[in-house]
C-alpha cells in the first residue's frame, strides 16, 4: 500500500508499482491538468507537478517511489495564485492550443515562489524543459513576467474588448490555462474500451499470416480487429483512396506505420500488453526509399506506378533560349529534409453511440472529410455518422489524415460500446505524415540590371507510402517555385514520388517552404557571384499589381510585398550580418476547386448566441476570429456572449482547415449569415429574438486551374512577407524582424503569436530539425532527438503588420497561419552566408565557420 498526499488530501494506491504517476493522476484521481505529450519520455513538460516542493515530470516517476510523498498539481495551487497565473497567460496571448499551458503555469508558480522578480533570461532558462510548438515562447515568457508583476502588487489583469484589431481572449483560453479537461483525453464515457494498434515491423513485407488467437485470449480483451472486420471500403485517403485502414493477409505493407490489427480491451494497459501477443509471419522485401530509384526502378509501390502526381507549369519563351540571351545564369540543386509536426496533443479519438447514430469525437482538421471516409469505411450513409470536433492541441497540417478515428469508429460500430484509440509519442512519430523532403534543381537567369528573365525548376518530392496531401503539396511547390517574384519565362515541373518511407503530407507552408528556400538561396548566389545588392534585386523583382505569379495568376489587388521590403530596408542596410527573404502564400486551395463555408447562428435566451461553422480550431484561433467578426458586424461588444459549436450534425459545412483559408472563408460566411440578424436588431433586442435561427454561406467557385486558357486566377487571395534575420558577432541569431501583409489584423495578439510561433518553427527548420530514416525505419523514437527549439533558443522577434485590406476579404482580413514560417529558413541561410561567405545547399544548415 502506497500512501501519499495529493493536493492537501491523503490518498492511497494499491496496484502495480511501475504505474507512472501521470496515469494514476489522470485516470484514477481525475486530475486532468497534467497532460501527456511525450508518453513517458520526459521531453515536453506538459505533465509537470510539484513533488515535495520541487518540479517533477509526472510521466518520469513511478508510483512505487511515492510512498509518503506530497504531490501538488495545478488543481491544488492556491486559487488566487492560479487565477492570476491563468489570467496573465490569457492577457499576454500565451494560450494558443493550450495543451502545454498547465505545465507552464505549474512551472511559473514555482519560478515566482523562489524569485518573485525574475529577468526575461531567467524565466527562459527555467522554462527550458517545456515544449510549445504553437507560440514560439515569446508570449509565454511575457505571461510569466506579467504574473510576477500582478502577484507582487495584487492588482487585477485587464482583458481587451471584442472589436476588430484588439486582443480579446481566445475562446476557452482561461479554462485551458487552468488545465480543464477540454481535450479528447479529458472526455469521460461509461463502459469505455481502449484500442491499441499493431503496426507492421517492416516498411515493405508481404503478410503471410496474422495470428491474433493469443491476444484474443488475454484477460480483458474483448476483440481484435483486422482487415476482415471492415464492412465497407477499407481504403481511406483525403485525395486518393490508396491507404488501407488495415493491411490484410496476402498483401504487402508499404511503410512501418501500416496497421495490421487493433486490440480492444477493458483498459489501455491491457490492450497494449495483448498487442504484443499478436504473431505476424512476414516475407520481408527490400524497401524502396530513394525517390529517384523509385522513379527508375521496377518495383511498383502502387498498382498505378510510383508517381503520385506531376505538375507542369510552362509559359513564356523556352528557357533554353532565354538563358542563352540572358546576361547572368545560375544553376544549383537544393535539398530539404523530412521533419515532424511535433504537435503536443497526441492523436486521440473516441467513438460511441449517441442519439441513435455513431458519433466520433475527433481533433481532426476536417470533420466533414472524416465523416465521409468513416461512413464509407463502415458502409453507412453520411447522415448516420456525426463527427464532433474537440479543439486540437496543435496540428500544423499533421491532423488532416485519418489516423485513429477510423479504428475507434470501427470498434464502436462492431462492439456497440464507446471505444478510445490513442497513440503514444513513438506511434505518432511512425504513423502520421511529415513535411516532404524535396530535391530542387534550379536555374535562374537575369539581365545586366538584375531583372529576372527565366526560371527552370525540377522538383522531386518524396511523398512516402501513401498519397495523403502529397499531390497538392507538390503542386503548391510548383506554383510557388519562383517565390514572391515576377519571372516572365517559366519552366517548372514538380513530381511527387511514392517510396516506402513514412508518408509526407500537409505541413505548415504546404510545399512552399521548400521552394522558397531554393529560390531565395539562388538569388543570394546570383548576388554574390555577380555583384547585385540583395535588397535591391528583391525589390526590383517583387510581385506587385499587374504582375504574374509563377502559376500565371496576374495580381489585381492587395499586394503589400514592396511595403514589407521597404519596412526592413534600413535595418538590413545597417546590420553587419543579416539575411533577407520574401514570401508569397496562397489563401485557399483554389486552382478551380470550389470552396464552401456555411454558418448557422441561433439566438439563445438571455441575449446569447450560438455560432455553428465547419472549420477546425487547433490553436490558431479560428473560433475567436469568427466570434470577433460576428460581434463587429452586429455591434455586440461582449465576445463572451457567443458560443461556438463545430460538428457535422449541424450541416454547416467547411473543408479541411488548411491553406490559410479559415479566416477568409468563415468570415465571409459569418457576415452573410448575420445580415438578417443585424437587420432584425434594428427593431428588436437579442433577448426578444430568442429562438430565431439564421443561415448563411459563402462559396468561392471562381478560381481557375493553372493550365486554363485565358486569365489565370489561381487563388482568391495571397499573403506576403519579408523576414530579416540578424546575427551577432558570434554568429548567433540575435533578432528576427517579420513584416507581414495578411490584410487587416483581426486579433493583434493572435496575429503576433502566430508569426512568433511560425518564426521559431522556421528557425528550427533551418538549424536543427530533422527526421532521417534508415532504410524506411525510424532512427530514433525519442521526441527530444528531433531538434525542436526550446525557450533559450529564441531570439528577439519583432512582428510588424502591414495592413492592406483585401477588397474581397471579410473586413479586409486574409490568412497568416502558414506564411509566418515560409521565408524564415531562407533568411537564416542568407544570414549565415553573410557571416562566413559559405553557400548552403541543404537543410538543416551546416554550422557556421566561426570567426
Image (cartoon, helix red, strand yellow):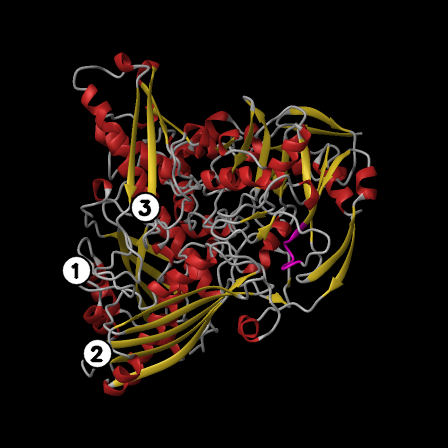
Label 2 to label 3, Cα distance in Å? 35 Å
Q: Residue at x 41, y 38 (%)?
A: 89
Residue named by callout 1: 545
Front position in the image: 183 or 355:
355
Q: Residue at x 23, y 31 (%)?
A: 632
Q: Is residue 631 magenta?
A: no
Circle 1 Cα neighbour tier, 10 Å, few/some/many (<14 / 14–19 / ≥20): few
Circle 3 Cα neighbour tier, 10 Å, few/some/many (<14 / 14–19 / ≥20): many
Q: Is residue 256 magenta?
A: yes
The first of marks 1 and 2 along the sequence is: 2
Q: Image quadrant for the N terminus? A: top right
Q: Position of residue 349 (x, y in %)?
A: 57, 37
Front position in the image: 291 or 102:
291
Q: Position of residue 261 (x, y in %)?
A: 70, 46
Residue named by callout 2: 450
| Residue 839 visible to the viewer | no
Region rendered in magenta = 253-259
Label 3 to label 1, Cα distance in Å? 25 Å
- Of circles 3 and 1, the one toward us is 1
Q: Is residue 454 depicted above or below 232 in this figure?
A: below
Q: Is residue 842 left or right of residue 712?
A: right
Label 1 to label 2, Cα distance in Å? 20 Å
Q: Which mark is residue 751?
A: 3
State the image quarter where residue 557 is shown.
Answer: bottom left
Circle 2 Cα neighbour tier, 10 Å, few/some/many (<14 / 14–19 / ≥20): many
Amino acid at each position: 500500500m502506497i500512501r501519499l498526499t495529493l493536493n492537501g488530501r491523503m490518498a492511497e494506491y494499491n496496484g502495480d508499482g511501475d504505474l507512472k504517476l501521470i496515469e494514476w493522476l489522470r485516470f484514477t484521481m481525475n486530475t486532468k491538468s497534467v497532460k501527456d505529450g511525450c508518453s513517458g519520455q520526459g521531453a515536453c513538460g506538459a505533465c509537470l507537478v510539484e513533488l515535495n516542493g520541487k518540479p517533477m515530470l509526472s510521466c518520469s516517476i513511478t508510483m512505487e517511489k511515492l510512498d509518503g510523498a506530497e504531490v501538488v498539481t495545478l488543481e491544488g495551487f492556491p486559487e488566487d495564485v492560479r487565477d492570476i497565473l491563468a489570467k496573465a497567460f490569457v492577457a499576454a496571448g500565451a494560450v494558443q492550443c493550450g495543451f502545454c499551458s498547465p505545465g507552464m503555469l505549474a512551472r511559473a508558480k514555482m519560478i515566482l515562489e523562489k524569485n518573485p522578480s525574475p529577468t526575461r533570461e531567467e524565466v527562459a532558462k527555467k522554462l527550458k524543459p517545456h515544449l510549445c510548438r504553437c507560440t514560439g515562447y515569446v508570449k509565454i515568457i511575457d505571461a510569466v513576467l506579467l504574473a510576477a508583476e500582478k502577484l507582487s502588487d495584487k492588482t487585477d489583469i485587464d482583458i481587451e474588448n471584442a472589436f476588430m484589431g484588439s486582443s480579446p481572449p481566445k475562446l476557452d483560453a482561461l479554462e485551458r490555462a487552468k488545465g480543464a479537461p477540454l481535450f479528447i483525453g479529458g472526455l469521460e464515457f461509461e463502459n469505455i474500451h481502449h484500442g491499441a494498434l499493431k503496426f507492421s515491423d517492416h516498411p515493405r513485407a508481404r503478410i503471410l499470416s496474422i495470428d491474433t488467437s493469443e491476444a484474443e485470449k488475454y484477460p480483458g480483451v474483448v476483440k481484435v480487429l483486422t482487415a476482415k472486420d471492415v464492412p465497407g471500403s477499407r481504403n481511406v485517403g483525403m485525395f486518393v483512396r490508396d491507404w488501407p485502414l488495415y493491411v490484410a493477409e496476402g498483401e504487402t505493407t508499404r511503410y512501418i506505420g501500416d496497421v495490421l490489427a487493433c486490440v480492444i480491451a477493458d483498459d489501455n494497459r491491457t490492450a497494449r500488453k495483448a498487442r504484443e501477443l499478436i504473431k505476424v509471419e512476414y516475407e520481408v522485401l527490400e524497401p524502396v526509399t530513394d525517390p529517384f530509384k523509385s522513379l527508375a526502378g521496377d518495383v511498383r509501390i502502387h498498382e498505378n506506378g510510383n508517381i503520385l502526381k506531376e505538375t507542369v507549369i510552362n509559359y513564356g519563351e523556352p528557357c533554353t533560349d532565354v538563358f542563352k540571351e540572358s546576361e547572368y545564369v545560375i544553376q544549383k540543386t537544393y535539398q530539404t529534409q523530412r521533419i515532424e509536426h511535433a504537435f503536443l496533443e497526441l492523436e486521440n479519438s473516441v467513438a460511441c453511440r449517441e442519439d441513435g447514430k455513431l458519433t466520433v469525437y475527433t481533433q481532426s482538421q476536417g470533420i466533414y472529410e472524416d465523416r465521409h471516409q468513416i461512413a464509407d469505411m463502415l458502409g453507412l450513409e453520411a447522415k448516420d455518422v456525426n463527427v464532433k470536433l474537440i479543439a486540437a492541441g496543435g496540428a500544423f497540417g499533421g491532423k488532416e489524415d485519418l489516423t485513429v478515428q477510423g479504428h475507434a469508429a470501427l470498434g464502436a460500430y462492431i462492439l456497440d460500446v464507446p471505444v478510445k484509440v490513442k497513440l503514444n509519442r513513438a506511434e505518432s512519430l511512425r504513423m502520421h505524415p511529415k513535411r516532404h523532403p524535396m530535391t530542387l534543381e534550379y536555374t535562374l537567369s537575369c539581365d545586366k540590371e538584375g531583372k529576372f528573365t527565366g526560371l527552370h525548376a525540377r522538383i522531386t518530392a518524396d511523398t512516402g507510402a501513401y498519397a495523403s496531401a502529397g499531390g497538392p503539396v507538390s503542386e503548391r511547390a510548383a506554383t510557388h517555385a519562383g517565390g514572391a517574384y515576377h519571372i516572365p519565362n517559366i519552366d517548372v515541373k514538380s513530381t511527387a514520388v511514392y517510396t516506402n518511407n513514412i508518408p509526407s503530407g500537409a505541413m505548415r507552408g504546404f510545399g512552399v517552404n521548400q521552394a522558397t528556400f531554393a529560390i531565395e538561396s539562388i538569388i543570394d548566389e546570383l548576388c554574390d557571384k555577380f555583384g547585385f545588392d540583395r535588397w535591391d534585386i528583391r525589390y526590383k523583382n517583387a510581385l506587385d499589381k499587374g504582375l504574374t505569379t509563377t502559376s500565371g495568376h496576374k495580381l489585381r489587388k492587395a499586394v503589400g510585398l514592396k511595403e514589407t521590403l521597404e519596412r526592413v530596408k534600413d535595418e538590413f542596410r545597417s546590420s553587419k550580418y543579416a539575411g533577407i527573404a520574401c514570401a508569397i502564400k496562397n489563401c485557399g486551395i483554389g486552382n478551380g476547386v470550389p470552396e464552401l463555408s456555411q454558418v448557422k447562428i441561433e439566438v439563445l435566451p438571455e441575449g446569447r448566441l450560438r455560432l455553428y461553422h465547419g472549420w477546425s480550431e487547433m490553436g490558431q484561433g479560428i473560433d475567436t476570429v469568427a466570434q470577433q467578426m460576428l460581434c463587429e458586424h452586429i455591434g455586440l461588444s461582449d465576445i463572451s456572449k457567443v458560443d461556438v459549436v463545430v460538428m457535422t450534425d449541424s450541416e454547416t459545412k467547411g473543408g479541411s482547415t488548411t491553406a490559410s483559408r479559415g479566416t477568409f472563408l468563415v468570415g465571409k460566411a459569418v457576415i452573410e449569415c448575420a445580415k438578417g440578424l443585424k437587420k432584425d436588431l434594428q427593431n428588436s433586442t437579442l433577448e426578444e429574438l430568442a429562438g430565431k435561427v439564421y443561415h448563411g454561406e459563402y462559396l468561392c467557385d471562381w478560381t481557375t486551374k493553372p493550365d486554363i486558357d485565358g486569365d489565370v486566377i489561381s487563388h482568391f487571395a495571397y499573403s506576403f512577407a519579408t523576414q530579416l534575420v540578424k546575427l551577432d558577432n558570434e554568429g548567433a541569431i540575435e533578432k528576427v524582424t517579420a513584416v507581414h501583409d495578411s490584410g487587416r489584423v483581426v486579433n493583434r495578439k493572435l496575429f503576433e503569436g502566430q508569426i512568433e510561433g511560425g518564426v521559431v518553427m522556421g528557425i528550427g527548420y533551418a538549424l536543427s530539425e530533422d527526421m532521417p530514416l534508415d532504410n524506411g525505419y525510424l532512427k530514433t523514437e525519442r521526441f527530444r532527438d528531433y531538434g525542436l527549439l526550446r525557450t533559450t533558443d529564441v531570439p528577439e522577434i519583432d512582428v510588424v503588420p502591414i495592413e492592406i485590406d483585401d477588397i474581397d476579404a471579410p473586413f479586409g482580413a486574409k490568412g497568416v497561419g502558414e506564411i509566418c514560417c515560409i521565408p524564415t529558413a531562407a533568411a537564416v541561410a542568407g544570414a549565415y552566408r553573410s557571416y562566413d561567405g559559405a553557400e548552403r545547399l541543404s537543410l538543416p544548415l551546416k554550422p557556421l565557420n566561426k570567426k
